[in-house]
Structure formats: structure tokens, C-alpha cells
Image: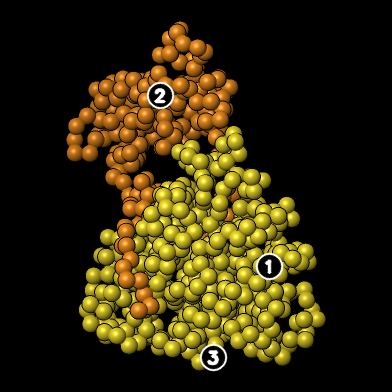
Amino acid sequence: MDRISVPERPEWRAKAAELGFTFADMHGEPYWDESSAYSFSLEEIEGRIEDPCTELHAMCREAVARVLADEALMERMGLPRLRWDFIRDSFEAGEPEVYGRFDLAYDGKGPAKLLEYNADTPTSLYESASFQWLWYEDQLAARVLPEGSDQFNRLHEALVERFAEIFPADTDLHFAAMAGAPEDYATVETMAWAAREAGMGAHYTDLEKIGISEEGQFTDAEDRVIGTLFKLYPWEDLFADEFSAHLASAQCRFIEPPWKALLSNKAILPVLWQMFPGHPNLLPAFFADDTKGLADAAHLMLAGHVTKPIFSREGASVTITAQGRVLERAANRAYDRHPMIVQAYAPLPVMGGFRPVIGAWVVGETCVGLGVREDRQLITQDLSRFKPHFIEG
Amino acid sequence: MKRSRAVSLGILGAAAFGLAACQQEEQTDAAAFPDKESCMAAAAQGGWFTREDCETTFAEALAVHAETAPRYESQELCEQEHGAGNCGGDAAAGSGGGGSIFMPLLAGYLIGQALGGGRAMAQPVVPKAGGGYATPTGGTQLSRLNSTGKMGTTAFAKGPTTAGQPPMTRAAVASRGGFGGSAATRSVGS
């Protein structure tokens, strides 16, 4: 793994504007940054990221079964008891997953370490699947990148295949995001492109405009009944919303399925460590009130530890501590009220003054691509930059 | 090869859905008035519309209201959507047919500058339950009348004809807005 300078495509800003990639700059800072790129060897991609992440996903499925079978662990998930059956039923019925993104700390030397699994509402899909792919094809055509190089990015094709695999042709699918968030909308729309290509009917509705019919089914902004809903909105928030009582009875299939609420949840990290202690891709993790577990594991946390809420987005309410000193504390504390977990600190490598975090995409049950984001801070937050990558020839 | 052979490079906000939420639409000068007189008074101050525009757009707004305002099977249902005291019987329905039809009263109208010249555009607005106003389809919402500013031109697109159609029943008027209240941040993805 290396971070190398590459010439930018001279016309990329115009191209981004033309393609509607309006958030290539965000908060007055560049978000898409192709002034440099991350390079990997093929062995590294396959042996350190692809295969381990496919295995991690399989382990996560085992962990879901374990949590569902253990009431004490279900309690740890911080989800309302009233919805436990709904979650369990979706897993027992084999409701298929579509996508997720593992965030990994990887320094090019040791094994990649799982920081968390964005298994429910991962974003940055457009930049990863589409704009990054275009960057590679353009740079290959311009001979900036050599013949024989490649990119780990089967994301779009894999999504098309996945939709075709789990839904009969011409199934009508609804896609919903919160209004007014272009980054979220781009992910939803990218997903809808793949569904269309797979032969599905794709309809968009703002999440807030979803209604409930007299028969108790969800309806879109134009009163069409929603049979399948892709919702870019966290399960734990759906469970807290006014319509949550209708979720189980609305005869609606959801993407991601309800059982993903157990994986996007950081309470799964201590469960994984209990089930697979010492696994090379896992960091030691414990519930924050597990004082005995933490005391016994002190020798595993010499580099420091990270405190994270079980629910959190974009690094909010995360604190990194080492040698009794706070190294960094996220300014956004919106998730402070949730239960916490403690994870061993795996520092991100520093490359060109930035700290890259690997986002490894899983479609279905297989790792199919990656995207790199980098941040100047220790905690990757909403000012991070998206960087393209390639595989050396 | 570890990458997609082809990726459909759609245009964000335009391609995948029939009607995209983030679509950029053309903006035009627009103003909202409760009645023709307020429009006339504003026209007298100068600006892009004349007193004559006020006349023609008001007449058009009245006609469009009669043709496209939402229609309900009961006064109660209409008031639930548009507020107490804001509904009346459908005059156009006449005395024939079975049962009454109710529709929101005209609360005012929008006037918009036609892009590329031509006659000023008109659209009626009706009251919303809980305050504010909306065009008959509900597609454009305003917090107050007697205001001017830029508005998307789609606000002036005429909605489907409701006159002579069966009125909406309670089942058709779905309850909405039960999702989205628990988000901690504006962008909820991760």
C-alpha cells in the first residue's frame, strides 16, 4: 500500500458537475481528491482485504445468530424489545442482505483490523462504484496508469447481479432517503441505477413522505403501495419513529433487512471478540461496563483504547485514549447518551500527512470492492476526503 | 479483472427515477397574494408584473382552482387536511349525483414571470391544516402570502383535473410523516 502523486484529470471538475456530483466539495473543503491515489498490490488486495472481509461477513452472520439466541446479548443491542421478534423473524426467514461496508485500519504491513461494520446505511456508494471507476478508466486511457493495472471495484456489477438474484424481474422497489441530503441521495440513486439495470422498477420517495394506508401498508408520496423499501435510514431510528408499530405488519420487505440492525451496531464488536478471540482481523473489544473483561485485557490495549457509542455516525461521540491521556475526542457528541463499547486502539497509518481508512464493500456475502477515505484527524469524520485507488500491474 | 466491465454513468438527480428529488429546475420571479387587490397594490409599486397581469392571473387562478383543487367526500376530511373553516361544498358538482363533495377554499394565488416572455403564469393556493399554503397538488408550499421571490417553474404546472372525478375517501388520504423524526443528523448515512 502506498500513497502516490498522480496528475489530476484536467477536466474532472467539469465532469463532476456534468454528472451531478455536486458534493465533490463539501463544507468548503475538497471531498473528492484525486491529486494523489492509493496503490495496492494484487496479493495485498486479495489476501489482506478481499478474502478477510468475506470471512468477516460470514463471522458477522454467525454473530447475529448468536445474539438472537441470547437474551442478555439482545439487551446489549439497545433496541426496543417490542421489535425483537421482527428482527429475529427477518433472519430466520433468510431475508437477504444487499450491501455493507467494513471500515478497516490497514497500514500495508500487518493484517487489516475491523474498526466497525456499516452494515445498514453505508454511504459513499456513488463515489466508490461510479466516479472512482470513471477515474480509473480515464487515467488508464490517458496512460497515467499502465496497462495491466486494475482497480478493486466490482461494486456496480455485483449490485446488479445481487438485485437480479434476490428479486424476480420487474419487481417494483422503492428507494427512500431523508430529503435535503445530497450525499445520501447519491447513494440511493446509485443503488437504484443498479436495480434498474437488473430489470427492476425503481421509484424514489422522500422518507418523510411515506404514509400508511388504511390497510396498514406503507405508501409513497404518490399513494402507491410500497412492497419493498430500500431505506437509507438507520434501523434504530426507524424503531424510534412514530410508524414503528407498523413495521412488522406492513407486508413490506426491507433493504437492508431488519437483522442488519445487529451488525451496524457497535455492540456486535465485543460479541465478535468473544466468539473469535485473537482473530487476526479483529480488535479486542468489550462492553464499557465489563470491568473484569477490560482488566484482564489490559495487556491487549497498551497502544490505547477507543470508546464508541453502540450507535454513531461519522465518528460522533468517539474518544481515543492512550497512556491515560485523551488523544482525540470527537467534537460532535450527539450520540453520548447511548451505551458505550471499548475497543483496542489501532492507529491509522500516516501517509502524506493524512490517515487513510479502508472501506471494503460487501455485496451479498462477498467483498467486491474498496474505497479509501483519509482525514488529518485520528477519528475519520465528515471532513474526510475520498481518494481513488488502483492495483499495480 | 477486479473491476466492473461497465458502469452506467447516470446523472445524479436526473436519471434513475421518473421524478428526482434533487432535480435542478429553472427558477423564475414569483409573487404570492391573498387576492387581486393586493396584487394590484404591489403592481403599482413597479416591478415585473402589471395591474393587467393581476387581473388575468387571478381569473386563471380561480378557474384552475375550480378544476384542480383536491376534492373530498366529507367536510371533516377536507378540514383535516386544510384546517377548520377552510372548506366548502363543490359548486361545480351541482345538485345531481349522489352525495356532496368538499374542497378547500381559494386562499390566494401565485403569479410567476414566464421564462422567455409571454403571459404571466398563475396558480391557485389553498390553506394547509396547521398553517401555511400549498398549490392544489401540494407540490409547492408557502409559509405566507404577500411575499415575492424566486420559485421553480414547476410550481406553475397545472395539476390533474379533479372536477367531475370521484372525491378522495379517508383511505385515499393516507397518514404521512411517521418516519424521519428520530434522525440525529441531517445526513444519516455512514
Tell me what residue is drawn at x 66 percent, y 56 percent: A89
Instruction: Residue A236: give x, y in percent of width and height.
Output: 63, 58
Image vertical order of residue A359 relative to residue B122, above or below:
below
In the image shown, does A377 or B45 lie closer to the viewer? A377
Instruction: For marks 1 and 3, give the one nearer the viewer.
Output: 1
Q: Secondary structure at mark 1?
A: helix
Residue in the picture at 48% in, 28% down: B127
Distance (Cα) linking label 1 and label 3 = 30 Å
Residue position marked by numbered label 2 in the rendering? B162
User: Is residue A184 or residue B49 the one in the foreground?
Assistant: A184
- Chain letter behind tag 1: A
Mark 2: few/some/many CA within 10 Å (<14, 14-19, 20+): some
User: Do we see residue B100 in this rendering?
Assistant: yes
- Does A17 sit left or right of B138 as displayed? left
Question: Which numbered marker is on residue A110?
Answer: 3
Mark 3 belongs to chain:
A
Q: Amino acid at mark 1?
A: Ala
Q: Earlier in the sequence, mark 1 or mark 3?
A: 1
Does the CB distance between marks 1 and 3 fall below 8 Å? no
On the same chain: label 2 and label 1? no
Q: How many marks?
A: 3
Instruction: Find the residue positioned furthest to the left.
Output: B117
Q: Which residue is mark 1?
A: A65
The secondary element bearing badge 3 is classed as loop
Task: Indicate left or right for B156 with A333 as reference.
Answer: left
The type of residue carrying mark 3 is Gly
The residue located at (22%, 79%) in the rendering is A142
Identify by letter the chain in orange.
B
Q: Are marks 3 and 2 on the same chain?
A: no
Question: Which image quarter is the N terminus of chain B in?
Answer: bottom left
Look at the picture and state if B59 lies above or below B178. Answer: above
Identity of the residue drawn at 44% across and 34% down: B138
